[in-house]
Amino acid sequence: MVASTRQRWFWLTVLSLLSLQQWVLAEELLKYVGPEAAVCLQLKDLSGQTRRVEGSEIATRLRQHPFVTSWLSSNDFQKLNEVRGAIESVSGQSVVKTFDQLLGREVVVALYAVPGSDPKGVILLEADSKENLDAGLQLWRRLDQSQTTTSQHLDHDYVKVSPASGKPAQLYAIFDRTLVISDDENLIKRTIEVAQTRTPDGSFFGKAELQAALKRRNPNDLAALYVNPRAWDSQILRAESGLPAAFEKAWKRCQMLSLRATLADDFRFTATADYDSAGIASWWTSLVKATEQSDLQLDRTHPLALIAAAGSLNGGSVLEVFQIAQAQQPLSNDAERTLRILTGVLMGLHPIEDVLPQLGPHWTAQVLPRVDGKDQGVPIDAVVSIELNPRPREGQPSVDRALDNALATALNMAAAMQNSKNSKSIAVVQQKPLGAATLRWVGPIGWLQPSVLVTPKEVVLATSPGACESYVALSTKPTETGLHAKSLTQYGQVGIVNVASGRALLKQRREWFLQQARRGNLSVEDAERRVRDLDELLKLLDSAFVSLAADSQKIELTIGAYAANSQDAAKPKSDEK
């Protein structure tokens, strides 16, 4: 019995040590940051990531931009070169090599909230060796001609560096090849305390709220920023702050805010808010259900579209949100009258209770160059489509028939209103068959020709019949979008800007853009300069995108930019796969 108990304690001890070893090896520098830290910025493999950024297509284009080339030839940049030369003459090696030795592995910047004062910070860096770290500290002291004094906290040395120039003193402590720097002595002492605790729950890395954020890290991440909401409660939730009650409730639920910068085929900045959903309001649960991610229909986006958006829309869940809101705040009499009018043109279907549940689960929108053979007027069109999910009831018309009737009525009303205001031209409602459906449009109303098409599968609204026909053509033969959308289909709601298509439109319709620039009483030269600056700006990217997704644990916003490799972009179409 005694032997069995000893064996159990032995294996428990071994497992505990292995668990502790895993914690010590993982996220090395975060183990020196206190769990009460307010913000942590983490940069891993900084030397390798810097080279990846420098070798990216976006960085290559940025270096060729006139603003950057002019700065590289400026006096300010020459002064930086002189400083670099002075450092290299003292150190006996290149600044790049010194950077790799001291900062190349990992860097963490941690901020601690101080009530009634500005946040205090500490910088942690992991050098590639203890010898190179010592050499870097000697170089620092030689460049600043500084004096040092050594003190102790919990039997661990830390050093105060006082520059001869009279600049504020800095303090640092060394843990093997890890260096901790701060201008606040209390933070140096706190770092020593955290380092000596050596338990997961005694550091920022050990916070349970951080673990979900760390699991989302991947090798392509350039940097990660973590914000601890609880460290800011005393400042944000003050009685005198006057913040809305809804914001305070949302803030209290937020467990961790994180921001990741990623470089793969594109640059991406992803902001994530992890939150506690226990006991959350039912309207939020329904709203999340309404926008739950499903396969986005980005393949129905025109390859030349200037702007495209796609997302999920569950009409049934939207109805739940509306019913919850209506229970808290009943509709006004004017709103009720409007709904009765809409019910009439919808052939008896109530727009909220009957039509809304039959919308979704997809929607798309796009802005594309207008192709009408004219070189005058606004050069763009827009198309919006909403998928239908018919749930017919006995004795009621189908949702597509009801919507077709309502939209046809709207076009007739638009024509009548336009004709009552304008005596020079007559707006006429026209129609023609398009497949098994009927395409209707009215015009002209300014530069618009509002168009509608309703099928049993979707509703399409457009600014011209040609735009509507272009969209329908994609419905029968989906195409590979020119908007770098392949890697975006996992997001809930996505918007994309096709910068390459914008460049082509600017070239094709340059005179129109010059006319718009001159509307602000600008001279011809200033208008030319503005259009030229816009052209140079558009050359930096081929597309940009934004996405938003939410589930029962997190809300995530992603912003990104993409530039095709110059060599790939130059390949003939027949070579592309």
Image (cartoon, rainbow, N blue to C red):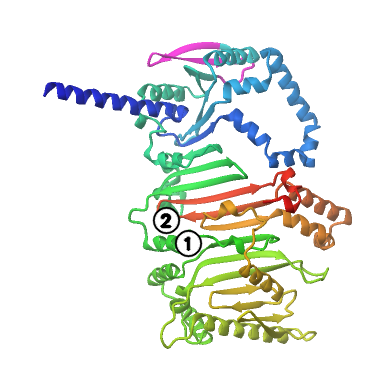
Q: Is residue 388 magenta?
A: no
Q: Residue visible at 69% across and 85% down?
A: 429
Task: Examine the rendered structure and indicate whether residue 509 appears above or below residue 31.
Answer: below
Secondary structure of the residue carrying numbered label 2: helix
Residue lying furthest left = 1
Instruction: Decide: is 550 above or below 455.
Output: above
User: Would you say 486 lies left or right of 568 here?
Assistant: left
Q: Which residues are magenta?
A: 148-169
Return the x and y of residue 195 as percentages of the image width and height: 40, 23
Is the residue marked by circle 1 packed among few (<14), some (14-19), or many (20+) residues within 10 Å? many
Q: Nearer the viewer, residue 190 or 1?
A: 1
Kindly tell me whether residue 91 is visible in this rendering. yes
Quarter holding the N terminus is: top left
Q: 413 or 459: nearer the eye? A: 459
Residue 118 visible in the shown view: no
Q: Which residue is mark 2?
A: 245
Quarter residue 444 falls in? bottom right
Determine which of the numbered discs, if any, sits on residue 291 in the image.
1
Q: Nearer the viewer, residue 117 or 446?
A: 446
- Residue 165, by quadrant, is top right
Q: Is residue 193 left or right of residue 527?
A: left
Q: Amino acid type of disc 2?
A: Ala
Q: Quadrant of residue 493?
A: bottom right
Could you tell me residue 46's position as x and y percent? 58, 30
What amino acid type should be assigned to the residue bearing mark 1? Thr
Mark 1 and mark 2: Cα distance apart in space: 25 Å
* 6 left or right, relative to 416: left
Q: Furthest-right residue in view?
A: 524
Please indicate whether residue 443 sits to the left or right of residue 326 in the image: right
